[in-house]
Amino acid sequence: MKNINISLIDQIIYSASPFLLFLILSANTEISTFAILSSTYTINVLFNSSYQAYLVEPVITHWNNLDEKMQNQLLVSNLKTSIRESYVVQIFSLAYSALILSTLLNSVFEIVAYLLLLWLSGISTSTLLLSRRIMYLTNHKQKSVYLSLSYLIISLLFVNFFTDNINTFPGLFYLFISIAAFASTFIISKKQFNFFIKSFSPEFRGLIRNYRLFDLLTVPSGWILANIYLSLGIIYLPSLEIAQLKTYFMISSIGLAIHPVIHNVYIVKINNINRHLLKNYFSRVFLFISVYFIIFWFFQKQIYNLLFPIYNFDSSAYLLILLYTVSGIFWLCISTIFRALKMGKEIFIIYLLGALLLVCLFLFDPATNLYHAILHHTYSTVISLVVSLYYLYKVYEK
């Protein structure tokens, strides 16, 4: 229970960072600025997701398979800051960044400046992410809380005091969160980690090769499921619709924040299909989903108007985002079981099928308003949930 509580506190603080940052931005920046940041922040999410798939998850998943000597070697080599190990991630993310930015910005100078700042924010926040995860593996959970809290405070101070500068050039937002991430990592983790880089050992590369492949292939699909309309929706939707869409996905992020908490605790516990463990696992998932839905349904207008007073409340879009969130929580928690059982191929298929549906809808029946954009995301998430339940049934039968 203590581990759950520490994980919950840590995840609340960490998840609160982007939420509170964008809450400040939604209230204090122009709609066009908020829309641009909502779109470009998806690039930071893409970088973090790729970095996590390529570096973090293989280590987390295979940690118990490593002897103490290899675990210590990985810690000493400072895996989380290994820029050398993330070349593929950097190239992939920056190439896609250039594509998205070309649809948002007209100036070549602005695009180049954005790319540099996005790369910096991607490296810095990914380093922060892996710092937190390694701390769980090495029983430094409380240090992870301090790390998350430090990042939250520093980034909020920067954004709150320099809102006018962000309105002038939105790319400065990424400079501020980069400074916050690097400063926090150095302050909290300097005795355990540094920025001198060593590569993976050949033995460890062999161990994670297949898992890394499917996990990295999963990233584009997972990113599409959560971000396609925020990143590329500006092709079809005006800035106001993109800004409003971001507010509804922020409501969803409150519920989805539970998954990393459960994932961090159970990923190292689930080595096989144990009925008692699964019952305990899903009881926690159902409890949270129930509490989340009841609170956010019965107080829907009050919650939305409190958080986003300058935007109009849409009850239909709100109901859809709750359905999207509940489906997402459930199938993401199922995916944790598959990750623990090294079922990378099945996770890839689940993500891929949902993403293919969403891409088809985006290309051939593009949303023309907020409601339809959320509806498309909900369709794809429900498909992913159905497929994940099918695979869970097959595993349980075995």
Image (cartoon, helix red, strand yellow):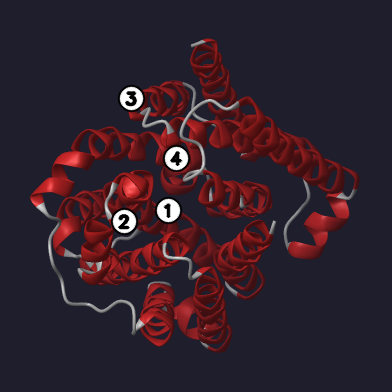
Circles 2 and 1: CB distance less than 8 Å?
A: no
Q: Sequence order check: which comes first, mark 1 or mark 4?
A: 1
Q: Quadrant of the N terminus?
A: bottom right
Q: Do the residues under discs 3 and 4 have CB atoms within 8 angstroms?
A: no
Q: Amino acid at mark 2?
A: Leu
Of marks 3 and 1, which one's residue comes earlier in the chain?
Answer: 1
| Vertical arrangement, residue 224 with respect to residue 153, above or below | above
Q: Which residue is mark 2?
A: 101
- How many neighbours does mark 1 have within 10 angstroms: few (below 14), some (14-19), or many (20 or more)? many
Q: Name the residue rendered at 67%, 53% in the picture.
A: 254
**Which is more N-terminal, label 4 or label 3?**
4
Element at label 2: helix
Q: CA distance from mark 1 to mark 4?
A: 9 Å
Which residue is pictured at 40% across the width and 69% down the height?
128
In the rendered image, residue 217, in percent from the top left (x then y), is placed at 28, 34
**Residue bearing the label numbered 3:** 345
